[in-house]
Amino acid sequence: MSNQKVVIDADQTELEALLNSSAPLDAGVMDDRHASALDSIDTEELSNWAARDAELDDLGSDVSTEIIYRAKLLDDAYPFKVEDGSLKIKESSINLFYIFCLVLSQSKLKAQKGEAAYNQMMARFFERSTLGIIRCSLGSLSNGHHFGFPRDNGSNIKQAINSLPKDLNISKEWKYNPLDYVENEVSNQKDLGIDQIIWIKRPDNRTFSHLFFLGQCACGGDYISKFNDIDLNKLNQYFRPFTHTHPVKMMSIPFILTDDDFQKVSHRAGWLFDRISLAGIYNKHPELD
């Protein structure tokens, strides 16, 4: 069973295959091998080096297993192919969204103080593109609205909140009517933790009691701190009434998680979409290109 170290090494192998058209299946552990060799020179403890080398062989095998597992999960949507002990980028029908997420997951999204975080544009694109991808997977009655900051129309939080009934074409829900003791909190927020709102309309002309999905996107390594950014209890204090049908929390990330971590994150963050999930949907909807 993979651990997150194996997942990261598999990403490194994919990146090398992307850059060079092909890479050994254990390319992701090459840095570890080089470091181990240098350590053995420094310490001259050859027996320890031999044990470490055997450990790296096992790790290389685990990386190969992880890559094969990804290919199995995505089938034709996987943008690489395993051939003659190497991972190779496909010549055609490449899943561009998988590649985008792979690159994004390796990007440093938080700039140091005084520096510009130019790749924040990638994170904003991720928010908007995953909104469309997830909405496509929910059928013809689904609709989507980008609520995360910064918004395309430049609206502040109060303006964005007050326009929700119109933007979502709804009545009797999302009524901004905060409790007195939380009203001052709202103006200090950017988006209430909500990047995306997706709703499935009723199959009639009623403009209320839809099913809502509230999405949070996280592209940095600090995604584990964002599980509770969407606070349904707090939203019920801001909107009265909020939604008549209990909403579903979602999280989208460009990473791949182990199966165990995927279940743990889902339990805390809601309906989870990682690189595998998103790339699989993207491949089934050519209109998203």
Image (cartoon, helix red, strand yellow):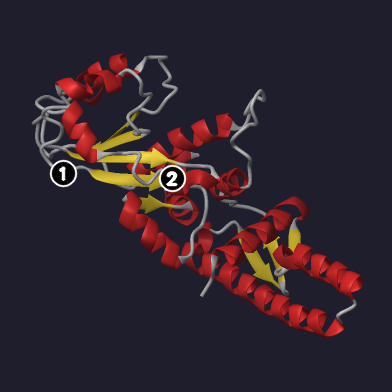
The kind of residue on which mark 2 rests is Ser
- How many angstroms separate mark 1 from mark 2 (CA)? 24 Å
The residue located at (36%, 15%) in the rendering is 156
The residue located at (58%, 47%) in the rendering is 105
User: Mark 1 highlights which residue?
Assistant: 246
Q: Is residue 248 left or right of residue 61?
A: left
Instruction: Name the quadrant containing residue 210.
Output: top left
Which element is circle 2 on? helix
The kind of residue on which mark 1 rests is His
Q: Is residue 130 left or right of residue 181?
A: right
Q: Is residue 265 left or right of residue 63?
A: left
Q: Position of residue 165 (x, y in %)?
A: 19, 22
- 6 over 271 or under it: above or below: below
Q: Residues within 10 Å of mark 2 (few under 14, many from 20)?
A: few
- 21 over 205 or under it: above or below: below
Q: Which mark is residue 120?
A: none
> In terms of depth relative to the viewer, which is nearer, 268 or 168?
268
Q: Position of residue 147 (x, y in %)?
A: 35, 27
Can see residue 260?
A: yes
The residue located at (75%, 51%) in the rendering is 19
Q: Which mark is residue 225?
A: 2
The residue located at (65%, 62%) in the rendering is 9
Can see residue 89?
A: no
Which element is circle 1 on? loop
